[in-house]
Amino acid sequence: MSTRRAKEPGLMEQIGFAPGTGRRIANWTVALVAAGVILAAILAFRLPQLAAAGVGEGLGNAGFTMRRVEIKGAERVSRLAIYNVAFDQPSMALAMIDLEATRERLLQFGWIREARVSRRWPDTLVIDVIERQPAAIWQNGGRLSIVDAEGVVLEPVRVEAMPELLLVVGDAANRQIGALATLLDRAPRLRPLISGANWVGQRRWDLRFGGGELLMLPEGEDAAARAIQRFALMDQQDPLLGRGFVRIDMRDPRRTYVRISRDPGAIVPTLTPPDPGQPPADLADTI
C-alpha cells in the first residue's frame, strides 16, 4: 500500500472550476501585466511607433479586440451614428483605439456637448456623452433650427414638427439667446406669455406675445431691462395685454407709445412711465 498522501484539490477546484483553471488564470494575468508594462514603456520612452503598433496588435491577437460598444447618456443623438464612429477604426485591437480622436469625431454632432471615451478590458469601448439641451427655435433666412442656450445649432426642424420653444428670429439671434434669457428673467411674470423674439438690426429686441402684441425694447442690456420691468409694472396695474393693442413701443425711455388694432395708423396718447415704487393710478384714464 502506498503511503503517499493524495494531492489535495486547489482553491479553484474546491469552488467548482476544472483542474488547472487557477494556473491558466495566473498565466493570463502575468501575460497581461507584462504586455501592459511593455506598452507603458514604449509610450513613456517614445520608442518607434511601429513597435507600439506591434505590441497593440499583439494584444489584439491575444483576444483584446473591440467587440462591444457601450453607450451612456445618448437620448436625442442617434445611437447608430455613435456606433458608426466607434467601429470606424484603423484597427480593432482595443489598445490601438485612439480615444481622443474618437472623442473629437463625436463632438462634431450638434447634440453632443461633451464626450468621454474609455476602454474596458478585454473587449469593450465605453462612450459616455453629455447632450445639449434645446433652448429655442431659431428662424433665419427661411430656415428653422433647434438651438441650445449657447446658440449651437442642434438640428433643423420642420414647421409642422416645431416643439414648444421660444422662437427667435434674426441674423445671429441664436448667439443672443443667453442674453435674452437674462433679460426675460427681469420680468418673470411675462415670460410664459412671450412666444417669440426678433433680434432687430443685431442691436435690440422686439418681443412677441401669444396674443399678438409686439413689445419694442430699446438698445442696450440695461435700457432693455428697465423697459421690460416698467412694462411689467404697467401691465400689472392696468393690463395692456389682451386689449387690442398691436404694438407697444418703449424705445424712448421718457415715453411709451401704443398702437391699436382697429386703426393701424393711429397712435394712442403717450403714457408716462410709472415710478417703480408708485402704482400708476391714472394709467387707465390715460389709455
Image (cartoon, rainbow, N blue to C red):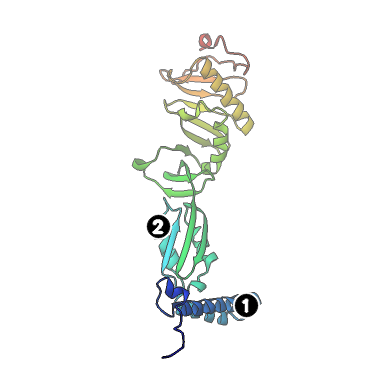
Count of marks overlaid on the render = 2
Residue assigned mark 2: 79
Relative to 278, 242 lies left or right: left
Where is 52 relative to 106, above or below? below
Residue 13 position by quadrant: bottom left
Q: Position of residue 64 (x, y in %)?
A: 46, 74
On residue 41, the disc is 1
Q: For the residue carrying disc 2, how many other residues have a C-alpha within 10 Å: few (<14), some (14-19), or many (20+)?
A: few
In the foreground, 23 or 74: 23
On the question of residue 251 being in view, the answer is no
In the foreground, 240 or 202: 240
In the foreground, 73 or 269: 73
Residue in the picture at 52% in, 64% down: 118
Where is 201 relative to 55, above or below? above
Where is 187 relative to 34, above or below? above
On the question of residue 268 being in view, the answer is yes
Residue 21 position by quadrant: bottom left
Residue in the picture at 56% in, 19% down: 233
Looking at marks 2 and 1 on the same chain, the residue that comes earlier in the sequence is marked by: 1
Report the mark closest to the observer, 2 or 1: 1
Q: What secondary structure is marked by label 1?
A: helix
Q: CA distance from mark 2 to mark 1?
A: 36 Å
Where is 30 relative to 138, above or below? below
From this viewpoint, which residue is outermost toward the right?
45
Residue in the picture at 45% in, 25% down: 213
Q: Position of residue 218 (x, y in %)?
A: 59, 29
Q: Mark 2–mark 1 contact, CB under 8 Å?
A: no
The three-letter amino acid code for the residue at tag 1 is Ala
